[in-house]
Image (cartoon, rainbow, N blue to C red):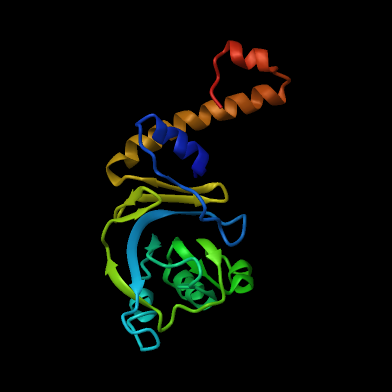
C-alpha cells in the first residue's frame, strides 16, 4: 500500500490537489484505503427531538468502503466506539469525519480506523440529521465524489478522483521506487552533494 505522501506526490504530476489535512487518526498507526461512500449531515431542525441519526448512518456501513462524513461541527460527535464496532463487523475500511467523534479509549483499543477533526464528548443524538447520502462533498476545498479512492494515515488524508486512480497508482509506483532508491543511497552513506548531482526528488 502506498502512503499518503507518495500518493500526494503522484497527484502533483497530474496537477490534482487531493490532500485534506487536520483529520488525524484516533491512533497514530491507523490507516485506511478504500472507495468513498459519502454522507452529509445538517443540524436538526428541532434539536432535542428524535432524528434519522444514528440509524440512517449505521445502515450505510458498506463493505470495503471508506465512509466520508461532512457537515458535523468539531464540537459535536457523530461517531464512537459502538459505531466503530459495527463498522468493523460490516467490513468498512475506515471512516473520515469532517467533525467530531468520541470514545477514544474504545476506538484506540480496536482495529477500526477513525480519522476526524477532533474528539468531543458531546453527542450528535437529537442534534444532527443525515441530509444526503452518495452525493459529492467538499472538505477544505477538496471535492470528494462517491467511488473516489481514499488513502488515510497519520500524515493526512488523500483523495484520488476515480477517473484518475489507475494512472495515479502507476505514477505512485514509480515515485515509491525513486524514494526507496534515495533511502538506500542515504543508508549507504550518500551525501547531499551525491543526491543533488543525480537530481533526486524528495
Image quadrant in which the C terminus is located: top right
Residue at the (30%, 46%) spot, across then down: 162
Quarter occupied by residue 54: bottom left
The outermost residue toward the right is 189
134 left or right of 81 in image: left
Residue sitting nearer the eye, 2 or 73 = 73
60 w.r.t. 190: above or below: below
Q: Is residue 161 visible?
A: yes
Q: In this view, does 168 lie above or below 139?
A: above
Seen at 65% across and 13% down, the residue is 194
Percent position (x, y) of residue 94? 46, 61
Question: Residue 150, position in %: x, y?
Answer: 41, 51
- Residue in the picture at 56% in, 58% down: 25
Q: Relative to 112, is 145 on the left or the right?
A: left
x and y percentages locating residue 191 in the rendered image:
70, 17
Q: How many labels does the image show?
A: 0
The quadrant holding residue 45 is bottom left
Can you name the residue that lies furthest to the front here? 46
Q: Report which quarter residue 182 is drawn in.
A: top right
Residue found at the far bottom of this picture: 49
Residue 114 visible in the shown view: no
Q: Where is residue 22 in the image (x, y as percent from the top left)?
A: 52, 53
Instruction: Give the residue displayed 66% in from the left and 13% down from the top.
Output: 193
Amino acid at each position: 500500500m502506498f502512503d499518503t505522501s507518495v500518493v500526494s506526490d503522484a497527484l502533483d504530476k497530474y496537477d490534482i490537489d487531493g490532500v485534506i489535512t487536520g483529520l488525524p487518526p484516533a491512533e497514530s498507526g491507523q490507516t485506511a484505503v478504500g472507495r468513498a461512500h459519502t454522507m452529509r449531515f445538517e443540524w436538526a431542525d428541532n434539536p432535542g427531538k428524535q432524528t434519522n441519526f444514528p440509524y440512517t448512518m449505521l445502515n450505510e456501513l458498506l463493505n470495503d468502503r471508506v465512509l466520508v462524513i461532512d457537515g458535523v461541527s468539531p464540537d459535536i460527535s457523530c461517531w464512537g466506539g459502538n459505531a466503530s464496532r459495527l463498522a468493523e463487523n460490516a467490513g468498512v475500511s475506515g471512516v473520515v469525519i469532517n467533525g467530531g467523534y468520541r470514545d477514544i479509549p474504545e476506538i484506540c483499543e480496536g482495529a477500526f480506523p477513525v480519522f476526524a477533526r477532533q474528539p468531543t464528548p458531546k453527542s450528535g443524538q437529537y442534534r444532527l440529521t443525515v441530509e444526503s447520502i452518495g452525493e459529492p462533498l467538499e472538505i477544505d476545498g477538496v471535492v470528494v465524489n462517491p467511488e473516489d479512492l481514499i488513502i488515510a494515515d497519520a500524515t493526512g488524508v488523500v483523495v484520488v478522483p476515480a477517473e484518475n486512480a489507475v494512472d495515479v497508482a502507476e505514477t505512485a509506483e514509480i515515485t515509491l521506487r525513486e524514494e526507496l532508491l534515495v533511502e538506500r543511497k542515504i543508508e549507504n552513506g550518500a551525501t547531499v552533494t551525491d543526491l543533488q548531482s543525480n537530481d533526486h526528488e524528495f
